[in-house]
Amino acid sequence: MSPAATGPATAQLRSTGQLPSGGPLSELLARTPAPPPHPHADALRAELTHWLAGTGVLDAAGTARFLDRGHLELAARCWGDVPAGPGLRTAAKWLLLAGILDDHVEDRRPGDPTGAARHTIGALHALFAGGTPTAAPGHGAALVRAFAALRRDGAALTGPDWAVRCDADFRAHLDSSLARLSADGTVPTVPQYLTHRERDGAARCAAGWVELAHGLDLPDRLHRHPQLTDLLTRFRHLVRWIDDLGAGRTAASSGRTLVRALEVHRGLPPRTAAARVAELCAAELTTLEFLADGIARGSHWPTPVRRHARGLVRYAHALIHWTADR
């Protein structure tokens, strides 16, 4: 078994009955290669720790607690094969700020009684729609400033097609974040879950970070190609379901995971529901790898597309191991 399958989060999931011991997720981990970290991972961590402290998004204690959860380690493994340049740093910053935003929203559920998270989301929505963001209270103002700088940096490193996709995908994620604040604890049915998660732009954002980290600038005409569309759809499914299986804070604490939907509306015991989702992950990963290999070996594809296909698979591999070990 992979070392990641014996991490603290895995033990916690087993204790709560969400992770089937010896079941499909263990098999998924065992057959999934763990990407090695970036050769300059320590330097990346030092640089981004200094950057995050300087944004004022979190206080010193909050910064330490957040970084201890391993987001920089995930970035170092997702993009361990790219040069240590601005693309890598900017993609890693996106990963960090997105995680902090999710915490900002989740810590204010249910109801967001002070309205702080709603103001922050509203300001970010205006920013990523090309407008002027309204003032956000407290640490939310620093978060908006940090995202504004990151938006400019990403656009400067890529091109207009990437920037438009990034804006649209992040706005979709903000809309889903706003919906989470209003969630009343009702567990969605499986069809409701699938519809809602398809609208959430979080996994599409992750695909954009892969493109950014690798210094790619894929035009929309390639993104709309059926073969690449299929690849990205598999990637999005896998990212969402792995997050659900890992009981990530955002989805799990609101009960809006596929595991919970299967438990409540299909009558499956928790371990059986988790095993079912793990099977879906395994099947989708196999398909993702197969489709990506077909693109990567296709001499008719431009080199940037082939690199993007390989990058999506590496991100998925790293995410699987990180999720099991956090």
Image (tube, rainbow, N blue to C red):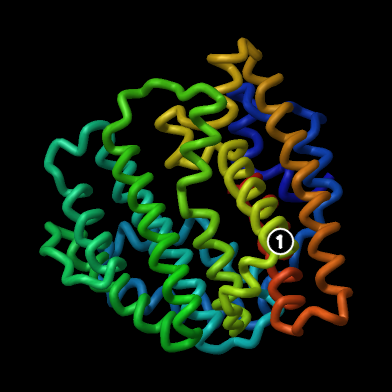
Q: Is residue 101 left or right of residue 83?
A: left
Q: Residue furthest top?
A: 267
Q: Count the marks.
A: 1
Name the foreground residue: 20 vs 190. Answer: 190
What quarter of the picture does the N terminus occupy?
top right
Q: Is residue 262 left or right of residue 205?
A: right
Indicate the quadrant where residue 154 lies.
bottom left
Element under disc 1: helix
Which kind of residue does numbered mark 1 sit on?
A: Pro
Which residue: 42% across, 56% down?
99
**Residue 16: image x %, image y %?**
58, 23
Name the foreground residue: 83 vs 48. Answer: 83
Indicate the quadrant where residue 182 lies.
top left
Which residue corresponds to mark 1?
226
Which residue: 44% across, 60% down?
169
**Residue 236: image x %, image y %?**
61, 52
Q: Is residue 21 left or right of residue 266?
A: right
**Is 110 placed above or below 129 here?**
above
**Residue 252: image x %, image y %?**
48, 33
Q: Label 1 crowding class (10 Å Cα cut-off): few <14, some 14-19, many 20+?
A: few
**Is 52 placed above or below 237 here?**
below
Which residue: 72% across, 49% down?
4
**Is 15 placed above or below 142 here?**
above
Name the foreground residue: 293 vs 43. Answer: 293
**Residue 41: image x %, image y %?**
60, 77
Which residue: 81% across, 58% down?
289
